[in-house]
Image: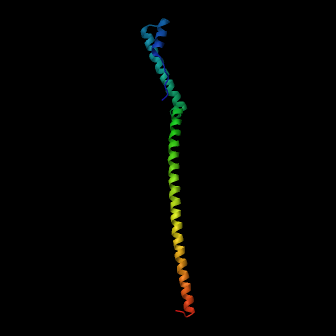
Amino acid sequence: MTTITFDTLLFANKLKEVGFTDEQAQVLTELQLAITDNTLEQVKHDYKLDDVATKRDLKEVETALKHDIREVELKIELLRADTGRMIAETKAELIRWVVGVGLLQTSLIIGALMKMAHLI
């Protein structure tokens, strides 16, 4: 939240130095403080200063984003490793099937040739 520093004691003392009474200085100080607060609220409303990001806000967002990016990078690396493992397993299984089917086909062809040659 935006604030304006207003030294009420200094203001009142300056008024007293130029001839104001304690009561007059107190009333003027209170009025000046109220005017300052009202002006600040009006400026904040007019320019929507509550929605303005500060450097600290931006730094916090930057830090959070860097942390999130690092987490995503780690997850990507885990997924890559898992995908590589799954590809290797699938490749090994596919090779077993191809070899098995190849042996079966070879056996069937040899059996058919032997049958045709009346060897069986």
The answer to which of 19 and 119 lies nearer the viewer is 119
How is colour applied across the structure in the image? rainbow
User: Can residue 48 be seen from the camera position used here?
Assistant: no
Total labels drawn: 0
Residue drawn at (56%, 86%) of the image? 110
* Relative vertical location of residue 112 with respect to residue 83 in this rendering, above or below: below
Front one among 100 and 5: 100
Residue pushed farthest front? 119
Q: Where is residue 91 in the image (x, y as percent from the top left)?
A: 54, 67
Residue 14 vs 48, above or below: the answer is: above
Where in the figure is residue 62, as x and y percent of width and height? Answer: 53, 39
Residue at the far bottom: name it: 118
Residue closer to the observer: 17 or 112: 112
State the image coordinates of residue 24 (x, y, percent, origin top left): 44, 10
Can you see residue 37? yes
The residue drawn where x is 55% and y is 77% is 102
Where residue 63 sits in the image (x, y, percent)? 51, 39
